[in-house]
Image (cartoon, rainbow, N blue to C red):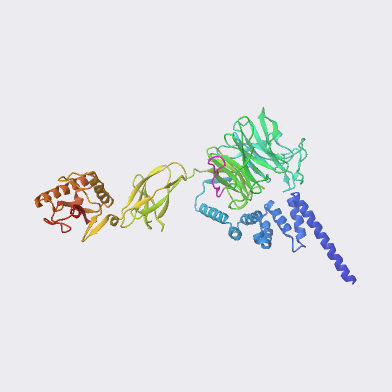
Amino acid sequence: MKKLLFFSFLICINFTYAQQKLKDADKLFKDMSYVDAAKAYEEYLEKEQNPSIQTLMNVGDTYYYLNDMRKAVTWYKKLYSVQGQNLNDVYLLRYTQALRGVRDYDDANKITKEYLKGKGDQDKIAGFARQQKYMDSLAGKPSLYKVVPLEINTSYSDFGSTFYGNQLVYSSSKKGGKLIKRLYSWNEQPFLSFYVADRNVATGALFNEQPFFSEVNSNYHDATLTFSPDLKTIYFTTNATRKNKNRLKNDKEGVNNFQILKGTIENGKVINIEKLFFNSLEYSVGHPSLSPDGKWLFFVSDMPGGYGETDIYVAEVFADGSINSPQNLGPVINTVGREMFPYYNDGVLYFSSDGHYGYGGLDVYESKHSGKLNFSEPKNVGQPVNSNKDDFSYIIDLESKYGYVSSNRDAGKGDDDIYYFTKAKAECNQFVSGRVTNSKSKIPIAGATVKVYDSFGDLKTETTTGEDGRYQLTVPCGATYKFEAAKENFASQEKPVVATAKNEEKQVVDFELAKLEDFTVKDGANEKIDINPIYFEYNKWNITPQAVVELDRVVYVMKTFPKVKIRIESHTDSRGSDSYNLKLSDNRAKATEKYILENGIAPDRILSAIGYGETRLKNKCRNGVKCTDAEHAINRRSDFIIVEK
């Protein structure tokens, strides 16, 4: 009995010890002291074999925030095995991002597909498939970018560069930046400060770095900033602090959020520093970025009403410096994950996200702006700008030739490093698509060949139509091409196509191909061009307007099918003398021949043009036989008989 009580006492002690460890770990997690939280959770989990769902989430998040994706995968995997389809979108995203962070792309895609299929969200399934296809296409294209690390990087966090005239301003946690040396409990590095450095125009290298304006460097985090075009106004991100800047000012949950401050640069100092009206102790705003004309301020926030963890917003900046109410950029840009570090240049919004399909962690994306809040579906800029780690704070010069990006990728010097890149001019291509159909039946023609020739007549590319008669081709911008559609037993058709200088512009060019049989009719052993009867005025052979319509059809057939050769036969009814009718019909045959030749048909393609008078009647209406006008009309005809094709 004493032995049983002893073991019960030990179990009670162990349980109490474990629960205290969990409380300690949870408190450190809540305080965002992730390095210490990770140690506390590991100690707790050494003894606890069946942690709660909340603990699995916290442990996974701890390593996720510390960028230890290998360990994050371990705990998110356990969480997914317990919750499955009940896992919310945010944790599904973190799990798959952690998998991509260790380059386990197959598992990440498999789990995403399983999850989306279980949810039955067809729009998201289609979007994922579209993004996956685009990412696969990137692998087969040469990159426009060349990326090199900077010597200025340290073993600490260096990131968030911004152009400042011919210099560059960036943030760093390297020693010496703060008057008061404190460590940030998140990753146990010093707080971030602003630095300014000269820039080598030829190589992008930075040198002569020194602390930036002391007025914008507080005792806590100061990171990401932007300047007005005249470099007289500055917006920057900092921790929310009390008036003396030596103490943080937290929300009611005890969390310290970020805010954007605005100041004026004058005589080597930043003066008139003020808070933006949309700052709040209850949420963060940061990563300010002005458009090149200074009229639009983009920034990031986790304010209520967004789509995910952090969203990108924009606010109009008026000429007097006042700012309009912010607007969320919407679900095309923002996801359930993190959208951060916006940068706008030449009608394109660049930003980082872990919510769109990527290589892992934050990736850099670009989206074309077409007015107001209209943005195209974001596209991953690809490697080597992006990696399986966090890639962010992308900036590029006004001519889109060079820039800087930050990353915590492998082989760097520290936590985050700054990289210089050059960007080659992208190929300008246009997409031409269309449909090839039968000109008479309008039925699609499968297997038709569509060829593209340049102005010298050289074949540049070709394709064939599918079962639906459709085709698609890509041609370089800024040139005129000849498109030709053809298929055996059909007449080919040519069309000029002018490709403008606008990249990825789409044009639709349809073709209608004709078959000779579509324009002919059988008459006994003869095959004739199918036209309506040609009428002439009484005792005349001049071409009437009605005759022109029918003869133009003959000309069209002969031009469309250049191998066709014909003979012309003209006939009359039996009224009138035989000799008169013979001469009249011959004159009419010669008149129709002349019209056809005058409209561009070579003489050798008309083998004969003969009038036969009333010698080849098609009914009983011979001399002396009483017939109606309609019966006589059957014999008044012109035939265009195909001799060769």
The residue positioned farthest toward the top in the image shown? 267
What is the x, y in percent for residue 300? 64, 43
Residue under the point 77% across and 59% down: 44
Quarter of the image for residue 326 reads: top right
Horizontally, is 145 left or right of 42 in the view? left
* Image position of 427 (left or right of 444): right
Observer-nearest of 620 and 169 = 620
Q: Is residue 372 visible?
A: yes
Quarter that holds the C terminus: bottom left
The question of residue 314 being in magenta is answered with no
Q: Residue furthest bottom?
A: 1
Relative to 590, say whether 72 is above or below: below
Q: How many marks?
A: 0
Which quadrant of the structure image shows residue 277?
top right
Report x, y in % for residue 202.
55, 38
Q: Is residue 154 visible?
A: no
Of residues 421 and 447, the one drawn nearer to the viewer in this rendering: 447
Residue 628 horizontal/vertical position (percent)? 18, 54
Q: Is residue 97 left or right of residue 493?
A: right
Judge from the rendering whether residue 624 lies leftward or rightward of residue 403; answer left or right: left
User: 329 or 243: which is nearer to us?
Assistant: 329
10 versus 605 height, above or below: below
**Range covered by the magenta-colored residues:** 368-384
Q: Main secondary structure of the magenta part?
A: loop
Tell which of 291 and 619 is nearer to you. 619
- Res 220 → quadrant: top right
Estimate the x, y position of residue 148 in percent, counting from the top left.
Answer: 58, 45
Q: Residue furthest right?
A: 2
Q: Quadrant of the N terminus?
A: bottom right
